[in-house]
Image: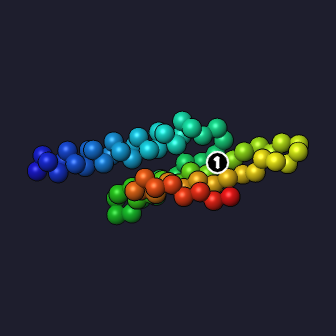
Amino acid sequence: MQENAQRAKNKDIQWLALVRQQVESLRYGVVQIVVHDARVTRIERTEKLRLEPDGKTAATSTEISGDGKENNEL
């Protein structure tokens, strides 16, 4: 029983660390946590970048799934 509790605590620490990492590296944007059956299944990060007068900078969207894999969209 204690082993299951320890595993659950370790998973909590993992997703909390992912959320912290995403928030700390974000200047402007949103970090969302998706929950399914009382479990964090996905962390979504949308970063907003301000446009420069030359128009070179665009908004990007980055999604981090629950398995730690990163999906980027432009």
Residue of label 1: 47
For the point 41% across and 40% down, the residue is 17
User: In the rendered view, does 66 fall on the left or right side of 46?
Assistant: left
For the point 64% across and 48% down, the residue is 47
Give how far across and how far down residue 73 sits, in percent: 63, 59
Residue situated in front as seen by the camera: 70 or 7? 70
**Picture layout, residue 49 above or below residue 70:** above
The quarter of the image holding the C terminus is bottom right
**Picture layout, residue 69 above or below residue 6:** below
Quarter assignment of residue 40: bottom left
Helix, strand or loop at disc 1?
strand
Residue situated in front as seen by the camera: 68 or 39? 68
Q: Amino acid at mark 1?
A: Glu
For the point 52% across and 43% down, the residue is 22
Residue at the outermost top position: 24
Count every numbered label the image shows and give the total: 1
Give how far across and how far down residue 5 sits, in percent: 19, 47
Residue at the outermost bottom position: 37
| Scheme by which the image is coloured | rainbow
For the point 82% across and 48% down, the residue is 56
Q: Tag 1: Cα neighbours inside 10 Å, few (<14), some, or many (≥20)? A: some
Give how far across and how far down residue 52 sits, in percent: 83, 42
**Picture layout, residue 51 above or below residue 73:** above
Quarter assignment of residue 50: top right
User: In the rendered view, does 73 fall on the left or right side of 40?
Assistant: right
Give how far across and how far down residue 37 sits, in percent: 34, 63
Residue at the outermost left position: 1
